[in-house]
Amino acid sequence: MVELSDSVRYIKGVGEQRENLLIKIGITKSEDLLFYFPYRYEDRRTPTKISSLRVNKVGEKSLIIARVAAVEKRSTNRKKFTVTSALICDEEGNTAQAVWFNIPNLEKTLTPGKLVSLYGKVEFRGLWQITSPELEVLDDESDANLGIMPVYPTTSGLSQKMLRRIINSAIEAVLPKLSDFIPENIRKNISLAQAIETLHHPSDRSVWAEARKRLVFDEFFLLQVGFGLRKRMIESKAAPNIIPGGKFNSFLASLSFSLTAAQSRVLNEIVDDIKKVHPMNRLLQGDVGSGKTVIAAAALCAALDSGKQGALMVPTEILAQQHYARLSKMLPNVAILSRSLNTQERKSVIEGLKTGEIKIVIGTHALLSENVEFSSLGLVIVDEQHRFGVLQKQSLISKGFPLMHPHVLVMTATPIPRTLTLSVYGDLSVSVIDELPPGRQPVETRAVSNSKLANVLQFVKKGARLGRQIYWVCPLIEDSENIDIASAVNRCDELRNCLGLRTELMHGRLNGNMKNSIMQEFESGNIDLLVSTSVIEVGVDVPNASIMVIEGADRFGLSQLHQLRGRIGRGAEKGWCILVSNPKTPEGGERIEAMTQTADGFKIAEIDLKLRGPGEVCGIRQHGITDFRVADLIRDRKILLEARAEAEKLLDSDPELKSEPLLLKAVMERIGTALDIAGTA
């Protein structure tokens, strides 16, 4: 008897060799086979007569049932390359030819007189020919496997025919043992077992659609229940009561500008949260340049007012230095912790955090080190949070234990579509800064081909004469034999020689002190042109930089291009972003077009979601949260909202799922680790 959790090798037709092939496509347990769904289907309900054959369109194939009249196997000039051809004939006397390449002993199966079913691409070469068709040998026509056939993602050595047999064996052996974990009053009309079997073997589109809807709902419902459990678990923890006071008020009064209405609204939401004795767990979204840093600084002031420590974690050394340079002027007891500190400096900061002498620390991944301890961590802020993994963020948050759970604010300048927010950050409260501060200049984005590079150089030279500073971004640090694009190193030398501007090079391999020194020189106006890789993507803020050239622009992701563009247009002058490329793929062309059509980060995010998928957009694919087997976040938005509503209703009445043990078990098994439901969050 095979159980759901048993190794896939115990399913009929698998064994050790095929088990290794199945592991390659992510199947390890018997249960995995049930949820390994087709990515498309082939309609083989009606065989085509040879007399009715026509040349197949792209992606189209034909099904022929006929008898083998003659078989020939021949070798070719290519070593170990054989061709087996069979002349087939139907009962009306019409003939066609079937051809296979490099299939051993096929001629022994295709003996004359055998009735066969062939499915493949049809061509006309003086005679109708079906190339490399799927083959079934039949006793009579009633044995033909007619119907809508599933087509699965597979791997070399594992044919569709074999994979179908193995999945059918699993359906027969273990599907009856699968529990329906959705509460009875929430279930759709179709059972879980029916839905799974239908998705593998649909009889028609309407039945398939109903089955798919049930499974989409299940995936979203499990995730939303998981988020709900995590949210309630966090809310049950004790958090420090942070009350804004003198430092908070003085900070806001010292600003040389007024907060926008959106900034004020968001700050009020954060203050309302941190006043409570349960942890804030909030996501702050704001497009590039919308003013998230000032909100973070105000929240850190509130922590200081209540005698608590605050930590701001950022993904890059450049961004850490930039935040430190600004916040250390605004706030007392601020330190920076990054890998560029020498041993003594690092030791001093770590000791200051442990004793509580240092109240605010800004750092990179260095904050996650085991020897970093806090005396009273009350507020954790993670900037550009999609750059950090779930477990990394949890590691920093846990440094507030065992005394109390710190309040948590995660920030992103990569706007996230609402559907994606619900499905990836469903346990977080969400704040959005949806307006830019007054005075932000629009950025004009133009796309040009590589052949127009000389014109771009003239534009850059003219801008420099007018006192503007320029970023020139390249996708590579050094030249590559495989990619015909100028590297940052070579382009820097060329631009320095041909433009006569004060030009410097920046990339990720430089040590932290060198990067900081270059950025300080650029900010001070001592560098006209900064040639860089995407290392300047986040946080860099030089108001006089108003021109950006992105070379090989089609090689960058859409959100990355938007982030890079956000580095300019921050001062009094209009910004210009020049995208230089010859896109080699349709997706590359779509990214360039999107950049020239809109500067709205949320519209950019929607397009990016369609092009790349949710896991790539949010940087959480490695955690399995958006690796849905059936659901599609773009087409299934209504079902997501329905599943969320049902999950909230259930958890309101049964917060610990005591009445639904099967559902709790399914949540823990499928997404518990990804959400750290059972952890110390």
Image (spheres, rainbow, N blue to C red):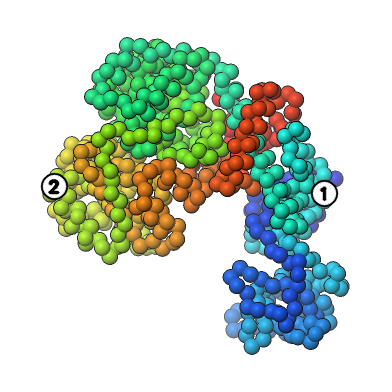
Q: Amino acid at mark 1?
A: Ala
Any part of residue 188 in sight: yes
Q: Secondary structure at mark 2?
A: loop
Q: Quadrant of the C terminus?
A: top right
Q: Residues within 10 Å of mark 2 (few under 14, many from 20)?
A: few
Please report the residue visible at 67 percent of the width from the left and 86 percent of the height from the top: 127
Q: Secondary structure at mark 1?
A: helix
Quarter of the rendering containing residue 311: top left
Quadrant (top left, top right, bottom left, bottom right) of the N terminus: top right
Q: Residue at x 28, y 65 (%)?
A: 451
Q: Which residue is mark 2?
A: 466
Closest to the camera, between mark 1 and mark 2, is 2
**Residue drawn at the location 75% of the way across and 72% of the way down:** 47
Whether residue 502 sits left or right of residue 197 in the image: it is: left
- Residue 219, image x and y in percent? 65, 40
Find residue 334 and report its image quarter: top left
Among the two numbered marks 1 and 2 on one chain, the one whose residue lies closer to the N terminus: 1
How many marks on residues? 2
Amino acid under disc 2: Leu
Report crowding for label 1: few under 14, some 14 to 19, many 20 or more residues within 10 A (C-alpha).
Answer: some
* Separation of residues labelled 1 and 2 (CA atoms): 76 Å
Query: Going 50% across and 38% down the picture, which residue do you hit?
Result: 418
Q: Position of residue 544 (x, y in %)?
A: 20, 40
Q: Which residue is mark 1?
A: 173
Residue 164's image quarter? bottom right
355 relative to 624 in the view: left or right = left
Task: Answer above or below: position of 194 versus 201.
Answer: above
Dot label at residue 240: none
- Give the percent coordinates (x, y) of residue 80: 63, 77
